[in-house]
Amino acid sequence: MASLSYPPMPPILSLVVIFILVYLIDTSNACGMQLCYDRWRTAASAADNGLIKPPNGEIPACVAHRTHLFCLIAEEQHCRTNLQYQMTKRGIIHKMKNDKCSAVGDAFNASAVMDKGIIIRPNNLICTFRSKYDKTPIKYQHCGLFGDPHLRTFKDEFQTCKVEGAWSLVQNKYIMIMVTNNPVKDHGAATATSKLTVVIKKNEDCASHDFVTYRARTNYLPGTFENGRSDVGPDKSVAIQVMEPGKHVEIYLRFIDTTIRVRQIGRYFTFAIKMPQEIVEQSLGDDTQQLCVQGCPEQEQINYKKYLAEKRKIMDLNQGDIAMTSERASELCRQSQVVDFYFDSCVFDLMTTGDENFTIAAHQLLEDLTELSPDIVKTQENRTYLNYEEIHPSSGCRLKSNFIPWTCALAVLLCFLFDQRNS
């Protein structure tokens, strides 16, 4: 029997396969977002400590913003396909516009400050948070709530819930945060956040001798606490900043190094919080059901993946209880540049309500969490499609996130062996 012969493998094909391998492997380590964030943090700290004095009348924060932006631009070659990179960059440009910062000017030169013998460290103001773990960097945890409503807990668990009525998000000896979720009018069982309350508890040393309350409700996102003030405590240890009137406020509690972002999009709110892990752990001893800590009760959780799978083939809105087709919703959510859980949630909200404001809510929440913690990009898959295989896995092997790179590596090896055989 004649032996089988194989045509020579074109060398160019091997090069193409190698290129695909390099392109598909996760490039999050090559993308320097964390480096840029660290440079911004150093510049922001210098600005807070009065070490930056712009000559053109800008506020010092503009130099920190430019430092961040210039660094990201320099990293564009490695990061241009990273959606979080694009959102972070747009977010900084938006901040610069709000703060009336010029895109042309100096960035922060840390070495010049160091040469003068000045050590840059976080604010040395009264009531600055000090971790009990002095020799290790502070670890932060994050929680977000948006849409119909969708939850990312401090443990990075993702849930979609009913939770109609009043619910606690966070409660410890320093702070209490609550939301009220009401039905989305004319859209069945869908609910969304229409009220949000933040209560800073009594703390005579670092806040106030009495409770300080911030309360937002539909069409009312105030720029002050209920007492009419925008800050309380020594050296403004608790402060609220209006980022965009009526649309975006940020509350910072320096004595527990906690940042809270609240946005109003359409008639409803999004919520994001960044809090040191050791402060989060103090919430565990409270018996209250806290959505950010324990997640939603099981009976309140919605299997959104099952819903998306069951409704995906409905094309006639008159024959199914949906407000938008899966195909159209997916298209709009891709245009909003949301990924993974935020993409799924965006599609779910559009199919259940038809309200396109929910695409903005998903985008802004993802952008807020990315800005508050650039490290979360390392956990993103950047998926912009509905993964029905994950909802209904077949009896065969399910594709893992590292399946494609390993397949490409095997293809390269096979190309090499073919080339050797025919040489």
Image: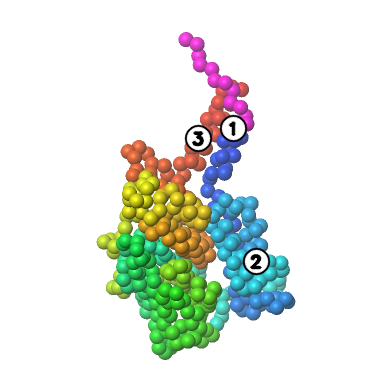
Would residue 56 be visible to someone looking at this image?
A: yes
Q: Is residue 9 magenta?
A: yes
Residue contact between numbered discs 3 and 2, judged by CB atoms under 8 Å: no
Q: Which mark is residue 410?
A: 3
Residue 159: percent from left, percent from top: 36, 59
Q: The residue tagged with tag 1: helix, strand or loop?
A: helix
Q: Residue at x 28, y 73 (%)?
A: 287
Q: Which mark is residue 14?
A: 1
Q: How many marks?
A: 3
**Rendering quarter of residue 203:** bottom left
Q: Which residues are magenta?
A: 1-12
- Check the image and tell me how it is coloured: rainbow
**Rendering quarter of residue 53:** bottom right
Q: Please indicate whether residue 129 sits to the left or right of residue 196 in the image.
A: right
Q: CA distance from mark 2 to mark 1?
A: 41 Å
Q: Is residue 376 above or below residue 53?
A: above
Report the front residue among 416 and 108. 108
Q: The residue tagged with tag 2: helix, strand or loop?
A: helix
Q: Earlier in the sequence, mark 3 or mark 1?
A: 1
Question: How busy is the neighbourhood of tag 2: few (under 14 within 10 Å), some, or many (20 plus)?
Answer: many
Would residue 141 be visible to someone looking at this image?
A: no
Residue contact between numbered discs 3 and 1, judged by CB atoms under 8 Å: no
Q: Earlier in the sequence, mark 3 or mark 2?
A: 2
Q: For the residue marked with disc 1, what is the amino acid?
A: Ser
Q: Is residue 154 above or below residue 119?
A: above
Q: For the residue marked with disc 3, what is the amino acid?
A: Leu
Q: Residue at x 41, y 66 (%)?
A: 145
Which of the two marks, 3 or 1, is nearer to us in this view?
A: 1
